[in-house]
């Protein structure tokens, strides 16, 4: 049985950087994203520069059947997922009652349902082997409510909570679960979420590589939560919890308003 890391949302941004980092360690990969052509380009590059095998699975994780289809495909190929990296996710800007419900529904499917289903499918094998690691890419958005990105912030709050809960359930199994919580990052996220003009995305952003490296190292160490930016970590742990809720909401909304 061949062991590998399964990475969703692997065609760009943090997911792509995680794939490069893992390949550099000499470990095999399963890359999942919607863009098959892009995945095949990445496969060719990684296999050329590293002594690894890369399996490509083009799936739209907003489709409810996708996680089961991924699981069965790997089972058929005899590939054991030793590292499950749930990175796929997206956001969207605007007032909840005015946004296209279909877009928010798809966001919930990808950010919550697919992540949860993939974890449920691959975790029993890890627990039985007493070996494996899960990295769920959440966000600093998961620590506060997010007016103008209400659904996105809520989905990431779910990921932060879910990851910690199952990590405790797995204590003693040698299987760890880590939630990576980056702030604004230099990826395609802002463009796809219509965040042009939002101040925090108009300044110098943390590189996707730096976020990926922080998350990868945290996963390997079995950390519960990784907030890669020190100033955000301080704010979320030592300032925000002591502020009145309405103050936090006003602060959060202001950070998402467009110029």
Image (spheres, grey):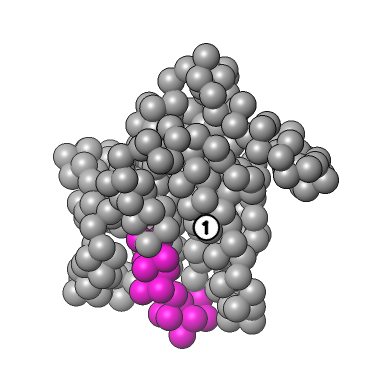
The x and y percentages for residue 23 are 40, 49
Give me the residue at 44% from left, 26% from top: 195
Residue furthest toward the left? 37
| Callout 1: SS | helix
The majority secondary structure of the magenta stretch comes to helix
For the N terminus, the quadrant is bottom left
In the rendered view, would you say 55 is above or below 208?
A: below
Report crowding for label 1: few under 14, some 14 to 19, many 20 or more residues within 10 A (C-alpha): many
> Is residue 59 in view from this perspective?
yes
Q: Which residues are magenta?
A: 114-131
Q: Identify the residue under disc 1.
A: 159
Answer yes or no: is residue 213 visible: no
**Where's residue 247, x and y in %?**
74, 36
Which quadrant of the figure has residue 30? bottom left
- Is residue 241 inside the magenta stretch? no
* Residue at 33% over, 51% down: 105
Residue beneath the point at 36% across and 37% down: 99
The single residue placed furthest to the front in the displayed view is 97
Foreground residue among 52 and 226: 226
Can you give x and y, in whole percent of width and height, for residue 122 in the image?
39, 73
- Relative to 165, is 48 above or below? above
> At which x and y percent is residue 109?
34, 56
Q: Nearer the viewer, residue 131 or 49?
A: 131
């Amino acid at each position: 049985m061949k062991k590998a890391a399964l990475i969703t949302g692997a065609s760009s941004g943090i997911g792509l950087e995680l794939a490069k980092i893992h390949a550099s360690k000499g470990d095999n990969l399963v890359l999942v994203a919607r863009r098959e052509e892009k995945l095949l380009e990445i496969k060719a590059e990684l296999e050329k520069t590293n002594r690894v095998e890369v399996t490509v699975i083009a799936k739209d994780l907003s489709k409810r059947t996708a996680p089961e289809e991924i699981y069965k495909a790997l089972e058929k190929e005899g590939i054991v997922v030793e590292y499950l990296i749930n990175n796929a996710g997206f956001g969207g800007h605007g007032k909840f009652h005015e946004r296209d419900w279909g877009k928010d529904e798809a966001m919930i499917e990808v950010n919550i349902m697919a992540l949860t289903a993939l974890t449920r499918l691959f975790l029993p094998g890890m627990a039985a082997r007493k070996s494996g690691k899960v990295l769920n890419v959440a966000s600093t958005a998961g620590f506060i409510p997010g007016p103008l990105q209400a659904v996105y912030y809520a989905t990431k709050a779910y990921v932060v909570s879910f990851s910690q809960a199952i990590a405790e359930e797995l204590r003693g199994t040698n299987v760890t679960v880590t939630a990576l919580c980056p702030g604004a990052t230099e990826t395609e996220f802002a463009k796809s979420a219509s965040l042009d003009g939002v101040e925090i995305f108009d300044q110098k952003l943390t590189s996707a590589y730096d976020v990926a490296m922080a998350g990868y190292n945290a996963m390997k160490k079995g950390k519960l939560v990784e907030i890669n930016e020190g100033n955000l970590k301080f704010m979320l742990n030592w300032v925000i919890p002591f502020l009145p809720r309405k103050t936090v909401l006003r602060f959060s909304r202001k950070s998402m308003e467009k110029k």
